[in-house]
Amino acid sequence: MTALQSPRDARAFGRVAVLFGGLSAEREISLKSGQAVLAALLAADVDAFGIDVGKDLLARLATERIDRAFIVLHGRGGEDGSMQGLLECAGIPYTGSGVLASALAMDKLRTKQIWQNLGLPTPRHAVLATEDDCHAAAQVLGFPLIVKPVHEGSSIGMAKVGDVAQLIAAWRSASAYDSQVLVEQWIHGPEFTVSMLLGEILPPIGLGTPHVFYDYDAKYMAADTQYRIPCGLDEAKERELKSLSAQACSAIGVSGWARVDVMQDAQGRFWLLEINTVPGMTDHSLVPMAAKAAGLDFQQLVLAILEDSCKERA
């Protein structure tokens, strides 16, 4: 990584605010991610401090001296372009993707539409707003299906369904998290996650879980989730997966760091699910695992992400 070949002096970053917590449904994970990032920065002698983002954020930005921000806010209010826009208005450089890419990636529907328009593979889908939409989706897509709130992460509000009654119930449940609900064809096969750091694709990770799918508990709580590095694909298929993930990131315009979630079907075809522009940084998180496989420890990873905030935005 270029940022690690000639790292700047830690003090040259100035005073760094680590933004975490927030008010989204992913607050608890963000708190853990933020504390881990803050600890790594302090251990590297960076002049860093934490802000648990709440309703007093504007006052904090106005009164604190902040030279740059490390965003570790997961979900809405932090990962959807709104925090990025606020920091730009305040003239504070920040980590990760810009306003537009953040907003697009947080919106699963818009992300899929862009991928489809560019000919990138993503599961067939429908948008649910009424019970009639549920019946229509069942007719067109068949079963099983997976239901997702459009603007949530960490698998919050997601459910696999096998008939219309389950679909309607899952739609109602997901609607409690988001006014927009997406339903996708279920892809039978292994799941992979592919991390991007500073424009480079890190080693893919193959995921395994006894759960119905890689849900919130499997992501953050369970001790029986399997992480395969190497991911289990042959060399040619791994190259294909990495290339597709790079195209997926480029299509949305993400920068700095991100993570792409991908399924593989029984015929060996890959299907793009979504992109996370502020992935988790907990002890169960996938980007640190991929970085470690690429030879970067957690502190090096955090410094590389922070280093990228020093570049001029396009």
Image (cartoon, helix red, strand yellow):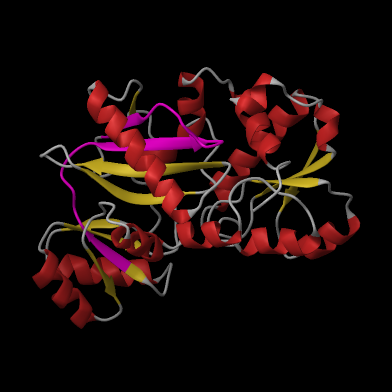
Q: Residue at x 56, y 20 (%)?
A: 296
Q: Which residues are the magenta region?
A: 182-209
Residue 138, quarter of picture: bottom left
What secondary structure do most residues of the magenta stretch adopt? strand
**Location of residue 171 in the rendering, given as x and y in whole percent from the top left corner:** 28, 70
Q: Does residue 283 appear left or right of residue 88 in this picture?
A: left
Q: Does residue 312 appear left or right of residue 135 in this picture?
A: right
Quadrant where the N terminus sits is top right
Specify whether residue 221 is in view: no
Instruction: Identify the residue at the far top of this view.
Output: 295
Q: Residue at x 45, y 29 (%)?
A: 202
Specify whether residue 100 is in view: yes
Residue 181, quarter of picture: bottom left
**Residue 2 magenta-drawn?**
no
Q: Nearer the viewer, residue 153 or 194?
A: 194
**Location of residue 272 in the rendering, given as x and y in whole percent from the top left corner:** 30, 48
Residue 165, quarter of picture: bottom left
Q: Residue at x 36, y 39 (%)?
A: 218
**Residue 196 magenta-drawn?**
yes
Is residue 28 positioned above or below 292 on the image? below
Q: Does residue 81 appear left or right of residue 110 in this picture?
A: right
Q: Residue at x 36, y 22 (%)?
A: 229
